[in-house]
Each structure stands twice: as C-alpha cells, then as structure tokens.
Image: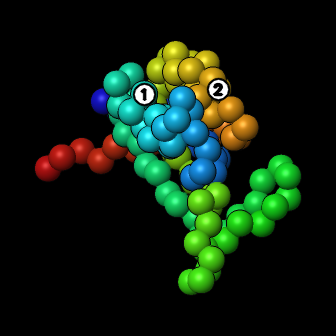
Amino acid sequence: MLSTGKAVKVTLYLSDGAKHHGVPVYTSVVDFLFHSGIAGVTVVKGVAGFGAKHHIHSAHILDLSDHLPIKIEFIDTREKVDAVLPELETRCGCGLIEVQETTVVVPSKR
C-alpha cells in the first residue's frame, strides 16, 4: 500500500495490437503487475495517435483499427518499480516506458 510521500510514476505507451507470446501486451503487463504486488494500475485506450514510425492510427466509425494507442500507468515505491522494470522492458518490446519521480498524497480515511 502506498503512503503519502515520494514515489515513482511509470507510464507505458503501447499499441493495442502489440502481442507478447500471443497475448495483448497490455493484458500481459497488467497481469504481471498484479501478481508483482503493484499498488494499482490504470489502462487507457486512446482514439488516435502515432509512434516512432509516424503512422497515424485513429478510430473511425467505418475503419476500426487494432493499432490504437494504449497507455498504462502505475505509481509505486522506487524499490517496487526497480524490481518490475526489467520484465516490463521485455514485455513491451517496441513500446515506450516513461519513469518519473513524483509525490503522492494519500488522504486519511475519516
């Protein structure tokens, strides 16, 4: 469980068409982070975007794409992030991983 103070935020930028051992990368990553004890994970699917190859992918009514952007975010302690980062690099392949120092405030329960 996270507590108020310094933490690390990790953001992974992927394509929803990306696979790891035949499974969508975002599914594989969420499952891995869950079993690794990460405090929480959010996955967001974008409606448009492009990556390093500069191919625009967008969701049109008549043209559904399987290469829409996916963003996975989680915040945890530096120790937990350092422990999972090597496996995330392996699973994400051609995606991008952003790691940044942050401060979290966990409201007290009243």
Which quarter of the picture shows residue 30? top left
Residue closer to the observer: 77 or 58 = 58
Q: Is residue 1 above or below residue 86?
A: below
Q: Residues within 10 Å of mark 1 (few under 14, many from 20)?
A: some
Which quarter of the picture shows residue 60? bottom right
Q: Residue furthest right?
A: 53
Q: Earlier in the sequence, mark 1 or mark 2?
A: 1
Residue closer to the observer: 108 or 10 = 10
Look at the numbered disc 1 and give the secondary structure of its residue: helix
Q: Residues within 10 Å of mark 2 (few under 14, many from 20)?
A: some
Residue 101 visible from this viewpoint: no
Count of picture labels: 2
Say how the picture is coloured: rainbow
Q: Is residue 83 above or below residue 18?
A: above
Specify the amino acid type for callout 1.
Phe
Look at the numbered disc 2 and give the secondary structure of its residue: helix
Image point (59%, 29%), residue name: 91
Question: Which residue does the numbered mark 1 point to in the structure image?
Answer: 32
Q: Position of residue 41 (x, y in %)?
A: 41, 42
Image point (58%, 64%), residue name: 46
Q: Residue furthest left?
A: 110
- Quadrant location, the N terminus: top left
Question: Which residue does the numbered mark 2 point to in the structure image?
Answer: 89
Specify the amino acid type for callout 2.
Glu
Image point (38%, 22%), residue name: 36
Which quarter of the picture shows residue 54? bottom right
Residue closer to the observer: 78 or 92 = 92
Side (left or right) of 109 relative to 38 = left
Disc 1 to disc 2, how far (Cα)?
12 Å
Q: Position of residue 64 (x, y in %)?
A: 58, 72
Q: Is residue 68 above or below residue 7?
A: below
